[in-house]
Image (spheres, helix red, strand yellow):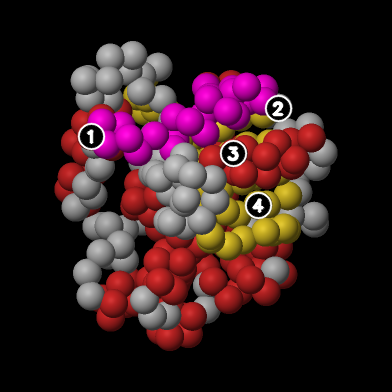
Amino acid sequence: MPAFIGLDLAWTAHRRNVRSGTGFCLFEGEGPDDFHCTHIGAQPLHVGTLTESVARVADRTASVIVAIDAPLLFPANPALERPIDAEVQRRFKPYKVHVLSAREARAKGQTAGIDLARTLAARGFTLDPTALLAGKHAGRLAFEVFPHTLHIRLFGLTERLLYKHGPDEERRHGLRHYQRHLRALVEREAPGALANPNVRRALDPQTAATAEGPGIKQLDDTLDGLTCALAAWLAWRSPEGWEILGDTSGHMVMPRE
């Protein structure tokens, strides 16, 4: 039974004392009859712990697809910007999407993505999604995604959802919009996931309405992890509807326009 993992990776997850949470969502199954969510949540997790968690899933199934919200590949020269970051900024600027500079993050020592990619590669994962999008069901694959681009194209939005920054009430408002769009997508594409009470809780508007302080960030991370897992599932199921932008210095997978 194939498995689909979504990780909203904390960029500081390589540090010994991790403070930021990583959203982690695990789907399993091939179709409507057996598709289900095994785990969903968000908590501080070190890269080593994440690698072991993903590897345990890979050890019991023939196919594992991992979609990760974090830069996984970089140019050999750390002073260079990734062309993919500029490309996504150009394409999605009309939607008010801002791309964080992977070069600047790397210069600050925020290397969780590249560290995770390296450890997964050592466990037999490929970081090249070309075969998957050609219709071949890869055995062990990890690739980069960016939730804002997923939202724009999967939800049919005219601008990005506002839930990452600002006063708590503004973030709660943005999260409720996020939940509404995401629940509609889950009901349409992966209804079996709703059998998990934690998925229903994450998508319940009341959860966003009552979230406070760290709970807002935890819900943010959880929903992004769920979005990433859906991207892994949908790219595997309908690869013709997805594309790769970028090159070997860094690329992202996203739905076609």
Vertical arrangement, residue 239 with respect to residue 181, above or below: above
Within 10 Å of disc 4 (Cα), the crowding (few <14, some 14-19, many 20+) is many
> Mark 2 or mark 3, which is nearer to you?
3
Q: CA distance from mark 1 to mark 3?
A: 23 Å
Q: Which residue is mark 3?
A: 48
What is the span of residues highlighted in magenta in the rendered image? 106-128
Q: Is residue 155 shown left or right of residue 31?
A: left
When asked about the image quadrant of residue 53, the answer is: top right
Q: CA distance from mark 2 to mark 4?
A: 16 Å
Q: CA distance from mark 1 to mark 4?
A: 30 Å
Badge 1 or badge 3: first in the primary sequence: 3
> Mark 1 or mark 3, which is nearer to you?
3
Q: Which residue is mark 2?
A: 139
Tag of residue 26: 4
Vertical arrangement, residue 253 with respect to residue 162, above or below: above
Q: Is residue 105 shown left or right of residue 175?
A: left
